[in-house]
Image (cartoon, helix red, strand yellow):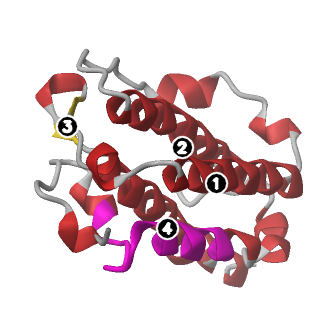
Amino acid sequence: MKKSDIKQMPPYFDRYINLAKDVPLLESLEISLYELEQAPIEKWKTLGNKVYAEGKWTIKDILQHTIDTERVFVYRITAIARGDKQTMIAFDEEAYAQNTTANTRTIEDLLAELILVRKSTIALFKSFNEQMLHQWGNGFNGIQYSPLALGFMLAGHQRWHFNVIEQKYLPLLAAN
């Protein structure tokens, strides 16, 4: 199933979904896995803990956030695919970010974990049939979404943050 097969685009998540290509979902997730495996680690390491503005996350924080987001949404995807109709609880990304050890870890370690999580996500989606992908679930704050939409959201969410790194963090290297 392709991105264009999403029956209703969930508000807020469309910003991420729109960054994913209109290819079959598994292909989209494999493309994002390849992007992880090709990440410019040396440039990221050179940045260290620099941020482009006060209060923004470091590269390590962004990687941890991407890991945490994928884990939270994989739970939601699994629950919805299995027919769970209860409203999913909110995800406070700022609270999660304040309670990690990301900046004590290496970029290689964080990236390796993210790659492992993405491979697990791909395996999960391989187990779904078309009906499961189109189940509707109840997100926080009245938003409804399907596992299909959330799968593309995960690929696009990663791309969103990689774009932020490219546009706002890597220029800091030239400022040195």
Q: Residues within 10 Å of mark 3 (few under 14, many from 20)?
A: many
- The first of marks 2 and 3 along the sequence is 2
Q: Which mark is residue 70?
A: 2
Instruction: Inspect the magenta stretch and tell me whether residue 19 lies in it.
Output: yes
Instruction: Inspect the magenta stretch and tell me whether residue 74 lies in it.
Output: no
Per the model, the C-alpha gap separating discs 1 and 4 is 11 Å
Does the CB distance between marks 1 and 2 fall below 8 Å?
yes
Q: Quadrant of the C terminus?
A: bottom right
Q: Which mark is residue 118?
A: 1
Q: Which mark is residue 136?
A: 3
In front of the other: label 2 or label 3? 3
Q: Residues within 10 Å of mark 2 (few under 14, many from 20)?
A: many
Q: Which mark is residue 26?
A: 4
The quarter holding residue 96 reads top right
Q: Which mark is residue 22?
A: none
Does the CB distance between marks 2 and 3 fall below 8 Å?
no
Q: Element at badge 1?
A: helix
Amino acid under disc 2: Glu
Residue 171 relative to residue 140: left or right: right
Question: Does 136 appear above or below 8?
Answer: above
Q: Main secondary structure of the magenta part?
A: helix
The quarter holding residue 33 reads bottom right
Per the model, the C-alpha gap separating discs 1 and 2 is 8 Å
Amino acid under disc 4: Leu
Does the CB distance between marks 2 and 4 fall below 8 Å?
no
**Residue found 42% across the figure and 25% down from its top:** 92
Residue 82 relative to residue 33: left or right: left
Say which of 13 and 137 sits in front.
Answer: 137
User: How many numbered marks are there?
Assistant: 4
Q: Residue 48: give x, y in percent of width and height.
A: 80, 58
Which segment is the magenta one? 17-35
